[in-house]
Amino acid sequence: MAEQGRVRVGISGWRYPAWRGDFYPTGLPQRRELEYAASQLTSIEINGSFYSLQRPTSYAAWRSETPDDFVFTVKGGRYVTHLKRLVDVDTALANFFASGVLALGPKLGPFLWQLPETLRFAPDVLDDFLGRLPRSTAAVAALAERHDDKVAPDRALTTTDTDRPVRHALEFRSPTFAVPEAMAVLRAHDVACVFADTAGRWPRVDEDTGPIRYVRLHGDQELYASGYTARALDEWAERCRGWVAGGQDVFVYFDNDMKGFAPHDAMALIARLG
């Protein structure tokens, strides 16, 4: 019988001025928003890492501001996914992993790699890229050692406190990936296929391809804007229970942040899951 997995539910990023006075209590200092969000949720996607290399001091601060059992997903850099488009990425990956992710310590969860809609499935490219991703924090540290001068020595973190497994998830947006051949490549590398709910904009693929299940809920009626109904949340809770019962750890992130629904929907799902 499979060992029970665990489900973590949260939001994609946490700095949203429009949430102040709604999700964030009136008068809460901005510097305490992560602390507050982490008190209500069980995980958060770090979005800033997608746009630019962060600093070890930032990751260390985020670790210190969250509960002991909290977990972060770190979003892979768009330089790797959108500019390099998964090709010739050794140095780019080294710089990304040297930028401080290891400062999260035991709170380091999966890495999320989000591909642009214009990037079509090419079996060899995907296979090569996934094969370069580190699968343990020791491997992250070893790869980080190969960073170039884009990460200054005093801003690089290339050591880990202990060796832990590292998981990866892939969110594609081109329908060319929604084929058995792409799923086979993901399975070969134990990389989770992101189950993305995007109001019909991008592929909605429910495939078990790795040791974790990873869900991104961008809005089922209006992309980034609509909230989830009680019935919809019930259905997602039921899916999560099934995955967890099968022994998988589950990560669910609400990205319907435009009108502030994301944190409220996340808390409602957490309540359903008990």
Image (tube, rainbow, N blue to C red):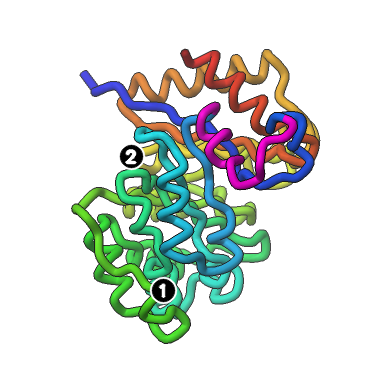
Is residue 13 among what the camera can see? Answer: no
In the rendered view, tell whether residue 87 sits above or below residue 195. below
Is residue 111 among what the camera can see? Answer: yes
Question: Which element is circle 1 on?
Answer: helix
Quarter occupied by residue 176:
bottom right
Q: Residues within 10 Å of mark 2 (few under 14, many from 20)?
A: some
- Looking at the picture, which amino acid does disc 1 mark? Arg
Residue identified by numbered label 1: 155
- Whole-number angstrom distance, CA of label 2 to CA of label 1: 32 Å
Mark number, residue 167: none
Residue 200 position within the rendered picture, expressed as x and y whole percent measured from the top left:
73, 39
Residue depicted at x 30% and y 61%: 134
Left or right of 140 in this view: 46: right
148 and 124: which is toward the camera:
148
Residue depicted at x 50% and y 65%: 54
Residue 74 position within the rendered picture, expressed as x and y whole percent measured from the top left:
47, 53
Mark before the other along the chain sequence, 2 or 1: 1
Residue 34 counted in the magenta span:
yes
119 and 83: which is toward the camera:
83
Residue identified by numbered label 2: 211
- Looking at the picture, which amino acid does disc 2 mark? Pro
Residue 93 position within the rendered picture, expressed as x and y whole percent measured from the top left:
41, 71
